[in-house]
Image: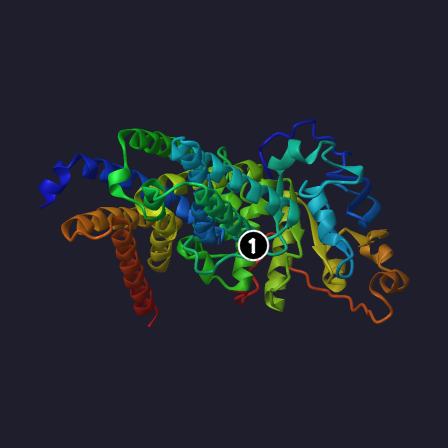
Amino acid sequence: MTSKPLPTTNNGNLPAIAVRDCSVGFGKNVILDNVSFDVQQGQVAAIIGPNGSGKTTLMRAIIGLLPLRAGEIRIFGKHFHAVRDHVGYVPQRFDFDRNFPITVGEFLELARHRHCPKDRVVTKIREVGLSPDIVMARLGTLSGGQLQRVLVAQAILNEPQILLMDEPTSGVDIAGEATLNDIIQHLNKKHGTTVLLVSHDIAMVSALVDNVICVNRQLLCYGPPRDALTAVKINELFGPQSAFYEHRHEHPVGQPYDHGHDHA
Amino acid sequence: MLAEMLAQPFMQRALVAGVLLAALLASLGLFVMLRKMAFFGDGIAHSSLAGIALAVLLGWAPLPVAVAWAVAVALFIYWLERSTQLHSDTLIGIFFTASLAIGVILMSFTNGYQPELVSYLFGSILSVRANDLLVIALFSAAVAIWLAWSYRDLVYASFAPDSAEVSGVPVRAQTAALYVALAVATVLGVKILGLILIPALLVLPSAASLMVTTSLKGYFILSVVLAEVMILGGLTISYAYDLPSGATVILLGAALFFLAALSNRAAHE
């Protein structure tokens, strides 16, 4: 997807993300305990688990926003800070004053690296299925679905090789969720972007990802959804009240947003 | 009348200082609004009273001591904000009153009427000396260079701190630098508007501009323009009608804000 060289030789066998024996905590509170997994290059993977299970903590640890108590995390074999130019990030919540005067174009520009061409803003806006005219709109006037797509456009502006998304479909309606899933598939299939997302929606995840990483303080399961998400594991992860209804929702690769209807 | 006003050396110094401070405070005011920390200017300005009182008590020049005190308070607030997760307004509320209390106690040790202290409370255009002007000019130039270099990073760090940090923006360093710049700019402005009124120059132009602009670029430019209108218009009116300069500047700013609010309301109807 990107023309930028990686800091090391791009060895196909090197995991895009390698998490080894990671523990994270605050004071006496252990949030993550001895978690290990790999996300291979070109994969779509999802961290799943119930509320408070440490999903977001794990994501924040991967991008260096939280310190590790133990273990290590490598991105393409390097520390995150050495490869941050190759990583895009969509935060879980983006709280801002909707009256603040900033256009979509100006918001996207904030993330544009100096080597990245200016017309990339419009290219990425199109890629997430929005009209180029939206760059002149005030950010605060966007719907939840449009805002989420703008956040994705900002995260992929510098054409990262890894895209990390924390609950990308939270606060988005069903149509918007389908659009975002299509965008993820488009980025992965067409550009080869490795995607790691956080979700609590097992049905959505099982239809979208190559591997799931189930966490609830510890790693409870890891692997392809069909193998990893057994009834026993889901019960263990979400409790006895949980149920799993498989979701099948596929769209042609390269047409991430063309559903014939509006997802705004 | 205008020619007469401009011929007065004290008025020339006040106008130049005012123009520089208006641009400085309005530029920084954008980040104050963005970070929802409008109380910061109030807190720092009132905190500086302790530095001024200490300097008066020791017979030192008040401005450098007040600046040093304000910078120390700003950095301490930033450090506590990061280490305790308390909201900045809570911490400012604590330091504002504690520092003010120190200032009141120190003032009680000084004998008799202290014109210097009163001029810092309400500001005085007569108090701007050539040395003050030089300090304001140098600091304004430094902040202008820093903003030109870091403007985008600062906005990104203020608007979406996590994403900014992930993309390599030195969020902590830029935030600390912003707090220091705000503290110094506020205390320098105390000379003209006084510590009771100076926070308004940080907030009023930005708040008025926020009402009528739709883009960041327009917001920044209009904030600076409105701040200059406040200062130049306010000082001129105060000279013409022999009114207190600081209060006149602020009332003009308040009038501009209400006009902007009316315009915003009209646009939404």
Q: Does residue B67 appear left or right of residue A53 in this picture?
A: left
Tell me the subunit letter for badge 1: B
Q: What amino acid is labelled 1 in the image?
A: Thr
Q: Quadrant of the C terminus of chain B?
A: bottom left
Circle 1 packing at 10 Å, graded few (<14), some (14-19), many (20+), is: few
Figure label count:
1
A246 or B86: which is nearer to us? Answer: B86
Residue A141 vs A16, above or below: the answer is below
Percent x, y of residue B96: 50, 49
Percent x, y of residue B52: 42, 39
Residue B141 vs B126, above or below: the answer is above
The residue at 64%/57% (across/down) is: A168
Q: Can the viewer see residue A134?
A: yes
Q: Does residue A55 appear left or right of residue B251 in this picture?
A: right
Quarter location, residue A232: bottom right
Percent x, y of residue B224: 31, 46
B103 or B243: which is nearer to us? Answer: B103
Residue that numbered label 1 is attached to? B90
Quarter location, residue A216: bottom right
Q: Does residue B111 appear left or right of residue A76 in this picture?
A: left
Colouring convention used in this rendered image of the protein: rainbow
**As drawn, which residue projects farthest toward the right?**
A232
The residue at 61%/54% (across/down) is: A183
Percent x, y of residue A190: 62, 46
Q: Can the viewer see residue A42?
A: no
Element type at marker 1? helix
A256 or A133: which is nearer to us? Answer: A133
The residue at 63%/50% (across/down) is: B85
